[in-house]
Image: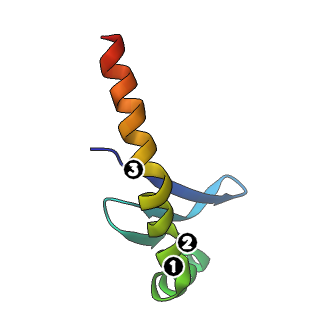
Amino acid sequence: GAELITSYVFNQVENIRFNSTVGKYVGYTELGLKNAEAWNEGSVLAQELGELERYCKPNAAIAYSNVLDKT
């Protein structure tokens, strides 16, 4: 299956990442850890999961179908 990863980078350092396989935000810096905790408890996670259902999954199915048609 497909996997959605959204990374938030500042000064070439990844602070936080959403991974659809994990299903939540994961922080990699002190600030990223704090943001991940807040985002996972609030509406930000719901919005990201909504985008996954609304945009990514339908478009992934179309793209996959197009790839199969060309093989």
Q: CA distance from mark 2 to mark 3?
A: 30 Å
Q: Which numbered disc flags the more N-terminal residue, 2 or 3?
A: 2
Q: Residue at x 30, y 20 (%)?
A: 68
Under circle 1, the secondary element is: helix
Q: Amino acid at mark 1?
A: Leu
Name the residue at the top extreme: 71
Marks counted in the figure total 3
Question: Is 38 situated left or right of 20 in this image?
Answer: right
Residue at which label 3 appears: 57
Under circle 2, the secondary element is: loop
Camera-near label (2 vs 3) is 3
33 up-or-down from 52: above or below: below
6 up-or-down from 48: above or below: above
Residue at which label 1 appears: 33
Q: Camera-side residue: 51 or 3?
A: 51
8 up-or-down from 64: above or below: below
Under circle 3, the secondary element is: helix
| Category of crowding for the residue at label 3, using alpha-carbon neighbours closer than 10 angstroms: few (below 14), some (14–19), many (at least 20) | some
Using the rendered view, name the quadrant where residue 64 is placed: top left
Q: Amino acid at mark 2?
A: Thr
33 up-or-down from 62: above or below: below
Q: Residue at x 36, y 49 (%)?
A: 3
Q: Which numbered disc flags the more N-terminal residue, 3 or 1?
A: 1
Q: CA distance from mark 2 to mark 1?
A: 6 Å
Q: Amino acid at mark 3?
A: Lys
Residue at which label 2 appears: 29
Q: Residue 54, how many percent across, how many down? A: 47, 59
